[in-house]
Amino acid sequence: MGGDNAPHMVIEGAALAIAQNPDLFLLIYGDESQLNPLLKKFPALTGHYKLIHTPEFIKSDEKPSIALRQGKQSSMRLAIDAVANGEAQGVISAGNTGAYMAMGKFFLKTIPGIDRPAIVASFPTNKKPCVMLDLGANVQCDHNHLVQFALMGNAYAREILNLEHPTVGLLNVGEEEQKGNPAVQMAATILRRAPNTINFHGFIEGDDIAKGTVDVIVTDGFTGNITLKTIEGMVTFMMNLAREAFQTSWLARLGYLFCIPAFKPIKKKMNPKAYNGAMFIGLKGVAIKSHGGADALAFSAAVLTAAKLVSHNFNHQIETNLELLAKDLEDHPDLSESTN
């Protein structure tokens, strides 16, 4: 029931996901008076879902604290409970991000060894897609959090980007080893001492993001969220500039017609629908957050991302990384203690 275009885009998106992955079975939570007519429109869903009725849902502007106290029978809470109780292996929502994160952390709990969940997502670069975290869940982070983000991002890149040894970089104000705040400095020191756990590139700067210098970008949620929003805003700005330029004269419009074949691969690469579905990584259970403004195609991408992570036993890989880190740091007791 969450999202700007819900519930229609959720049901249509579910049907698109089933078409690509017929092994999926969905528990759909929401108001049956609104959902039943939509479900009948998409026969591809027949036999692939169970509808659980609840008239309650979390409003987009509802405070997380209120959602936790009063949303026990909401569609979001019941969907999260299904994962917590083992009825489902993953949950997807396009609803209130703050409430979703709060409920997920409170009822799913975090993986042992992970202090805080983070928001991770993939997006395109000049070379190939990369992943970045944290994108807004944790405004303030110490070195332990950054190290844990690196381990989780490493596992996520292996699954989503199909990379055997993804490179990991810490976003910083410079590439030089002496630059950065104490948290970034200490996190880098630990990661450099863990070559068997992680392929650590070192520090990267803001311009390295679009270059595709590394496969995994690690930063705190404050910086990550601003970075992501800046990138999104700049892409929109450049697209608007190009659109205006091609409308300045009949000759410019004619030139646009000749440019269409060149623009098609760019549009495909930059299509945000293909990258929809950020994960609340670090929770016991796969929890995917779809963009609130997603359409059906974008929502289906979020569903398929959740299914892929579940089928590959993703959280077990994070636990393995934590064990590998502990072994890597056995010869460095001072660093080992700092990660506890």
Image: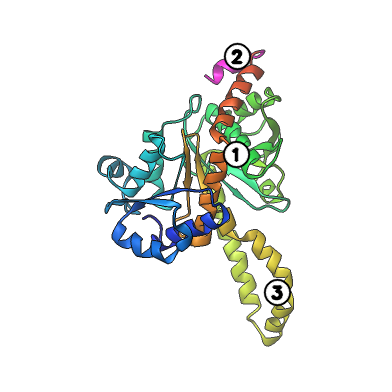
Q: Is residue 59 in view?
A: yes
Tell me, what colour scheme is on the image?
rainbow
Bounds of the magenta segment: 331-340
Residue in the picture at 48% in, 44% down? 136
In this rendering, the answer to whether 236 lies above or below 81 is: below
Percent x, y of residue 9:
44, 61
Numbered circle sitting on residue 260: 3
Residue in the picture at 73% in, 51% down? 127
Q: Amino acid at mark 3?
A: Ile
Mark 3 or mark 1: which comes first in sequence?
1
Numbered circle sitting on residue 302: none
In this rendering, the answer to whether 189 lies above or below 288 is: above
User: What residue is shown with label 2?
Assistant: 334
Q: Amino acid at mark 1?
A: Tyr
Front-most of 43 and 159? 43
Mark 1 or mark 2: which comes first in sequence?
1
Residue found at the far bottom of this picture: 250
Q: Is residue 138 left or right of residue 200?
A: left
Q: Amino acid at mark 2?
A: Asp
Percent x, y of residue 276:
54, 53
